[in-house]
Amino acid sequence: MAARPELILASASPRRLALLNQIGIEPEHLVPAHIDETPEKGELPRKLAQRLADEKAIAAQHKAKTTGIADNAIVLSADTVVAVGRRILPKAEMMEEASMCLKLLSGRSHRVYTAVTMLTTSGALRRRLVETRLRFKRLSTREIESYLASAEWRDKAGGYAIQGIAGAFVVKMQGSYTAVVGLPLHETVSLLAGEGYPVHFNWLNQSTLSGV
């Protein structure tokens, strides 16, 4: 009987790890993949998200192989892109970038594309792409300044984190909340289960784990 595959999460994001933990999954290995995330000329937001997710998975597998932990492992990666129309918003690192994003998103609709890539033990790529539509309230100058002061925007696509203070900015959302956070759980479970990863194992033991 073949040993069950291990799981490598190709991310340093505490949000993605927390989402996996939420559904009872604890990756055996965390192997962050550091790649150039610059959009190619004329690249559309959904294409960018999928390309980066693919590249992260491949880079993480290569990195894992050099340490001998990828022989029987599934690699899971994801990337999130925020866009207004065809315009891709940056992953805000400077306050000026976050301010620009918030002013652009204020009072209007935007889309969040989150791509998930799974690299199987046989080397096959399995993909899912989730599009979520959101609308922000019209933000006052005080709200923008206060949010910038919180520093919650730092290293977030589009300059905001829906799971934090910015959740109060969302007037309407159509799609997947967990995708906006960084990892669409429905699609992730579908991919892992389809490859034989025991996603339901901890569910069976949840009453014991929670002390019920």
Image (cartoon, grey):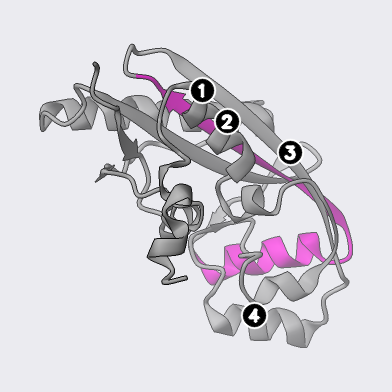
Location of residue 129 in the rendering, given as x and y in whole percent from the top left corner: 65, 31
Instruction: Check if residue 105 falls in the magenta segment.
Output: yes
* Contact (Cβ within 8 Å) of mark 4 with mark 1: no
Q: CA distance from mark 2 to mark 4?
A: 36 Å
* Residue identifier under label 4: 147
Helix, strand or loop at disc 1? helix
* Contact (Cβ within 8 Å) of mark 4 with mark 3: no
Is 131 placed left or right of 212 in the picture?
A: right
Helix, strand or loop at disc 4? helix
Instruction: Check if residue 161 falls in the magenta segment.
Output: no
Helix, strand or loop at disc 3? strand
The answer to whether residue 144 is seen in the rendering is yes
> Amino acid under label 4?
Tyr
Nearer the camera: disc 3 or disc 2:
2
Mark earlier in primary sequence (2, 4): 4
Q: CA distance from mark 1 to mark 3?
A: 22 Å
* Contact (Cβ within 8 Å) of mark 2 with mark 1: yes
Q: Quadrant of residue 64?
A: top left
Is 82 placed left or right of 212 in the picture?
A: right
* Residue identifier under label 3: 131
Q: CA distance from mark 4 to mark 1?
A: 41 Å
Question: Going 69% across and 29% down the picture, which residue do you hit?
Answer: 44
Question: Going 38% across and 20% down the picture, which residue do you hit?
Answer: 120
> Amino acid under label 1?
Gly
Segment tinted magenta in the rendering: 94-120
* Residue identifier under label 1: 194
> Amino acid under label 3?
Glu
- Between 32 and 200, the one lying in front of the other is 200
* Residue identifier under label 2: 190
Question: Going 60% across and 78% down the picture, which residue do you hit?
Answer: 148
Q: Quadrant of residue 39?
A: top right
